[in-house]
């Protein structure tokens, strides 16, 4: 889906799990409804349980390079990525452009 995109096209991918897949897909569909006839967008979803290693690898590309990138508690950012809670990634939307090799991450904000 991403590799076969034409230049200038983007994929909007929603991360879901089995519990809230239907609810999130309905909400996502409402937001992307105005874009459905636009030929430069494609839409999809990823199951977090099956694709967590791929998402983790994608996040590794956002980490800073060098020795001074370690947090103050001494653990490396790469080690923290190994312990990602899959429930906290649910609802995240990825905007991927395979032709120019860039992406944007939109993480949901939960307010009380």
Image (cartoon, helix red, strand yellow):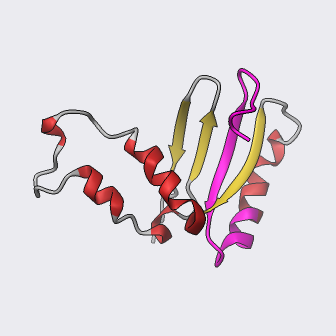
Query: At 38% from the left edge and 39% from the top edge, which residue is drawn?
Result: 62
Image quadrant holding the N terminus, namely: top right
Evaluate whether residue 107 shows in this view.
no
Query: Does residue 44 appear left or right of residue 17 in this picture?
Result: right
Q: Is residue 61 above or below residue 19?
A: above
Query: Does residue 97 appear left or right of residue 32 in this picture?
Result: left
Query: At 56% from the left edge and 69% from the top edge, which residue is drawn?
Result: 49
* Relative image position of residue 17 (x, y in whole percent): 62, 70
Q: Is residue 61 above or below residue 45?
A: above
Query: At 71% from the left edge and 22% from the top edge, which residue is drawn?
Result: 8
User: Which region of the structure is painted magenta?
Assistant: 1-25
Evaluate whether residue 108 shows in this view.
yes
* Relative image position of residue 64 (x, y in whole percent): 28, 36
Query: Does residue 46 appear left or right of residue 62 in this picture?
Result: right
Q: Give the mark count.
A: 0
Q: Quadrant of residue 73?
A: bottom left
* Relative image position of residue 105 (x, y in whole percent): 51, 44
Q: Is residue 94 above or below residue 21?
A: above
Q: Quadrant of residue 37?
A: top right
Image quadrant holding the C terminus, namely: bottom left
Identify which residue, 90 or 48, lies in the foreground: 48
* Relative image position of residue 106 (x, y in whole percent): 53, 47
Query: At 82% from the left edge and 42% from the top edge, which residue is drawn?
Result: 34
Identify which residue, 68 or 92, lies in the foreground: 68
**In the orientation shown, which residue stands out farthest toward the right?**
37
Q: Is residue 5 magenta?
A: yes
């Amino acid at each position: 889906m991403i590799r076969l995109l034409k230049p200038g096209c983007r994929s909007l991918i929603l991360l879901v799990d089995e519990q809230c897949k239907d609810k999130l897909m309905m909400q996502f569909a409402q937001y992307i409804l105005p874009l459905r006839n636009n030929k430069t967008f494609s839409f999809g979803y990823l199951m977090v349980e099956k694709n967590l290693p791929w998402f983790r690898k994608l996040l590794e590309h956002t980490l800073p390079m060098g020795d001074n990138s370690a947090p103050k508690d001494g653990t490396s950012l790469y080690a923290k990525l190994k312990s990602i809670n899959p429930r906290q990634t649910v609802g995240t939307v990825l905007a991927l452009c395979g032709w120019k090799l860039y992406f944007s991450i939109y993480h949901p904000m939960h307010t009380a």
